[in-house]
């Protein structure tokens, strides 16, 4: 089940997410697969994106030293 997000929420494609979280593509996608980072929203057959608020919240928790919570 996808997390709820606002209709006006900005969606970030993978390059923008990687810029914000500071991980390389393969490491980030591994962390998505094991549930550390949220799963993306499907935009089409071959396109996905992440809600900006979810990524910003994760970056804030990481920066404050709280770590990333699953779920």
Image (spheres, rainbow, N blue to C red):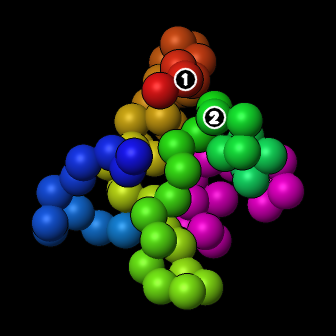
Q: Which residue is drawn at 38% across and 50% down?
A: 2
- Asked if residue 68 is positioned above or below residue 20 in the image, the reply reads above
**Mark 2 → mark 1, Cα distance in angstroms:** 6 Å
Does 51 sit left or right of 12 as displayed?
A: left
Q: In this view, does 36 lie above or below 40?
A: above
Q: Which residue lies furthest to the left in this view?
A: 7
Number of numbered discs overlaid on the protein picture: 2
Based on the picture, tell me whether residue 23 belongs to the magenta stretch: yes
Q: Is residue 19 above or below residue 33?
A: below
Q: Which residue is drawn at 52% across and 43% down?
A: 38
Q: Quadrant of residue 7?
A: bottom left
Image coordinates of residue 69 in percent, x first then y, are 53, 20
State yes or no: discs 2 and 1 in contact (Cβ < 8 Å). yes
Q: Can residue 12 be seen in this view?
A: no
Residue placed under numbered mark 1 in the picture: 70
Tell me where the magenta segment starts and ends, as one range: 13-27
Please tell me how crowded label 2 is: few (under 14), some (14-19), or many (20+) other residues with Cα within 10 Å. Answer: few
In the image, which disc is placed on residue 49? none
The image position of residue 4, as x and y in percent, is 24, 48
Mark nearer the N terminus (2 vs 1) = 2
Q: What element carries label 2?
A: loop
Q: Which residue is drawn at 14% across and 68% down?
A: 8
Q: Is the magenta stretch mostly helix, strand or loop?
A: helix
Percent coordinates x, y for residue 14 in the rendering? 61, 68
The answer to whether residue 31 is seen in the rendering is yes
**Residue 35 - label:** 2
């Amino acid at each position: 089940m996808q997390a709820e997000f606002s209709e006006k929420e900005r969606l970030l494609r993978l390059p923008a997410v990687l810029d914000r979280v500071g991980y390389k593509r393969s490491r980030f996608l591994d962390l998505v697969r094991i549930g550390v980072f949220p799963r993306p929203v499907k935009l089409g057959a071959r396109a996905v994106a992440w809600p900006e608020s979810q990524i910003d919240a994760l970056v804030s928790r990481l920066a404050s030293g709280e770590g990333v919570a699953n779920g």
